[in-house]
Image (spheres, grey):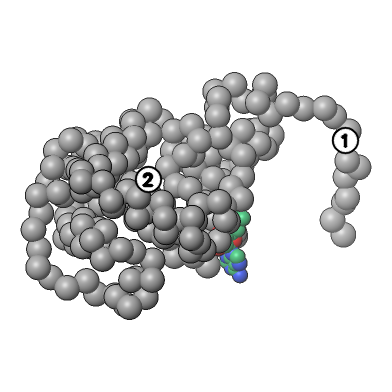
Amino acid sequence: MPTIRTPIRRTISFRQEETNITKTTQGLFGLYRYPAKFIPQVVTWCLKQGDYNSVIDPFAGAGTVGLACHLQQIGVEMWDINPMLKHLAQSVKTLSSTSVPNPLQLVKEAIDFKNSQALDCDLEYLSQWYDRRVLAVLKNLWLFYNQTSKRKRALLLAPLLRLSNEWSYNDFQCQKLFKSTRSINSINDRLGERTWKKNFYADFASKVSKAHNQYITQ
Ligand SMILES: C[S@@+](CC[C@H](N)C(=O)[O-])C[C@H]1O[C@@H](n2cnc3c(N)ncnc32)[C@H](O)[C@@H]1O
């Protein structure tokens, strides 16, 4: 029979215990926006309480446990029904074993990429979520992503996901995907500006540069 330990009553401030992590979105912990993420200070503290060789997280989400293990060099097995985790984990793994690409060069290469290929997905579904002008520019960036090197894809993944989300009709005030009048108006206001495409690419560049910093400051 497993022994049940009596709970210990103790007051603890994880922020004070884990002073190396000053905010929940620090470094790679802020790479991907995901609902109900664990607080990294709590996970990091818990991992330090035992002498763990490896850890399993069966509902890994954006991989907070995986990242904390990665930073403490503890082996980790992550499961999630959402296939996105596999790609994010692959990005972190790739860029921890090779140099992070130059963000400015990569952004230029992606923007200059011209392709007339069709997008291999359900356009009728996508047109529910995007204005066709946004879809056209996003399509080119994702086609670039698909044909570029593993190393460049690793840096591009999180910023492209965020860009695709923030330029969609999704309403960020809601936890789940939701299209509202407010979010539609917000996109229409942005597209009403003469410089919308320039703003779109500036947003893309800033997101890639931020992800670059998140990778190199770990
Ligand atoms: C609250 S999130 C976990 C967030 C995670 N702790 C983090 O810090 O990023 C719960 C996760 O459980 C996953 N999930 C839900 N049902 C599942 C199932 N039956 N099998 C595998 N994963 C599942 C969801 O896809 C979601 O990513």
Numbered label attached to residue 44: none
Q: Amino acid at mark 1?
A: Ile
Q: Residue at x 88, y 50 (%)?
A: 4
Could you say where residue 98 lies in the image, as x and y percent from the top left? 26, 39
Could you say where residue 67 lies in the image, as x and y percent from the top left? 49, 42
Find numbered disc 1 in the image and state the secondary structure of the residue it sits on: loop
Find numbered disc 2 in the image and state the secondary structure of the residue it sits on: helix
> Between residues 22 and 58, which one lies in front from this camera angle?
22
Quarter containing the N terminus: bottom right
- Locate residue 1 relative to residue 153 in the image: left or right: right
Residue matched to label 2: 92
- Give the residue furthest to the right: 6
Could you say where residue 41 lies in the image, as x and y percent from the top left? 61, 33
Q: Residue at x 22, y 37 (%)?
A: 103
Q: Can you tell me which quadrant of the image ligand 1 is in?
A: bottom right
Q: Is residue 24 positioned above or below 91 on the image?
A: above
Q: Are marks 1 and 2 in contact (CB under 8 Å)?
A: no
Q: Residues within 10 Å of mark 1 (few under 14, many from 20)?
A: few
Q: Residue at x 50, y 61 (%)?
A: 180
- Locate residue 134 relative to residue 59 in the image: left or right: left
Residue matched to label 1: 8
- Visible residue check, residue 218: yes
Which of the two labelled residues, at mark 1 and mark 2, occupies the earlier sequence position? Answer: 1
Q: Residues within 10 Å of mark 2 (few under 14, many from 20)?
A: some
Q: Is residue 172 positioned above or below 206 on the image?
A: below
Distance in Å between CA atoms under marks 1 and 2: 36 Å
Q: Residue at x 73, y 26 (%)?
A: 13
Q: Is residue 42 positioned above or below 144 on the image?
A: above
Q: Amino acid at mark 2?
A: Val
> Between residues 22 and 160, which one lies in front from this camera angle?
160
Could you say where residue 77 lies in the image, as x and y percent from the top left? 52, 55
